[in-house]
Amino acid sequence: METTSRAVAQGTGSADDGPQGASGTRRPVDGYLMAAFPWYGLDEAHTGRRWLMQVGAAADGTVEHGSTGHGEEPSLLRTGRAVPGAERRRFAVVVTVAGRPVRRSADGTGVLEATSVSSAAWLAGSGLLSCTWPAQMERALRQDWLDQQTALAWELADHMDEAPWTALSLPVDGVPTEFRYRESEYGWVLAGSPEEGGVHLGAYGRGMSAYGMGFSVIKDITAYAER
């Protein structure tokens, strides 16, 4: 999982990294449209706001993963700083990771490990940290804290059969699917692999309970860009 996860994380780019639209400007949705796998989000039981985040691509431009948001967008994602009431924002983010076998690196000099449910767990865990770090922390200490917590999320993703992970069954396109789930003071993280779709799913959130959630294929990703 290490080689793949680090490669995926380092290859993360903005959703604006996709092709240019007719006007010559890049649209946030373009990166998502380049993916060769289906995107997932919360199912129709979620009636709140839905929004795009970003996609991650390999060195050769192949889209490897991406995230879709639901609920209230965390202020830390937009501005890098907290606003009054930020800790009460309720959101859930779904991470879709393309299922990839062991494969050659883009430059042909090495091998990338296959993606796995651990890849999704790592991306979800680091994603949670990116939007819930203690805003009152001094800037000089913030990066050290993020590095430390990210390393911990990495270690946890490599040991998903152990505590603090527990089993949680949630529907994916109506099919009960087993996920691994953990909580922290910053929110919750879960990850699993649906039987269909050829992907691994991760999710994280705060203020919205993971229990009772359901996931489904997004039929029209452009609808997220319009909300």
Image (cartoon, rainbow, N blue to C red):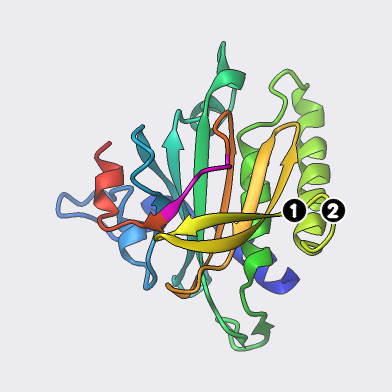
On residue 163, which mark appears? Answer: 2
Seen as rendered, the residue at the extreme top is 84
The quarter holding residue 185 reads top right
Q: Start and end of the magenta stretch?
A: 210-215
Q: Which residue is mark 1?
A: 166
Of the 4 image quadrants, the one containing the C terminus is top left
Query: Dot 1: within a 10 Å radius of its alpha carbon, few (fewer than 14), some, or many (20 or more) residues?
Result: some
Residue 164 seen anywhere in this rendered image of the structure: yes
Residue type marked 2? Ala
Query: Dot 2: within a 10 Å radius of its alpha carbon, few (fewer than 14), some, or many (20 or more) residues?
Result: few
Task: Residue 20: give x, y in percent of width and height.
Answer: 25, 57
The answer to whether 63 appears left or right of 226 in the picture is: right
- Mark 2 and mark 1 in contact? Answer it, CB < 8 Å: yes
The answer to whether 137 appears left or right of 201 in the picture is: right
The quarter holding residue 6 reads bottom right
Residue at point 64%, 67% (across, down): 117
Residue 3 magenta-highlighted: no
Inter-mark Cα distance, 2 to 1: 7 Å
Residue 82 seen anywhere in this rendered image of the structure: no
Task: Residue 65: give x, y in percent of width and height.
Answer: 50, 62
Residue at point 61%, 45% (across, down): 127
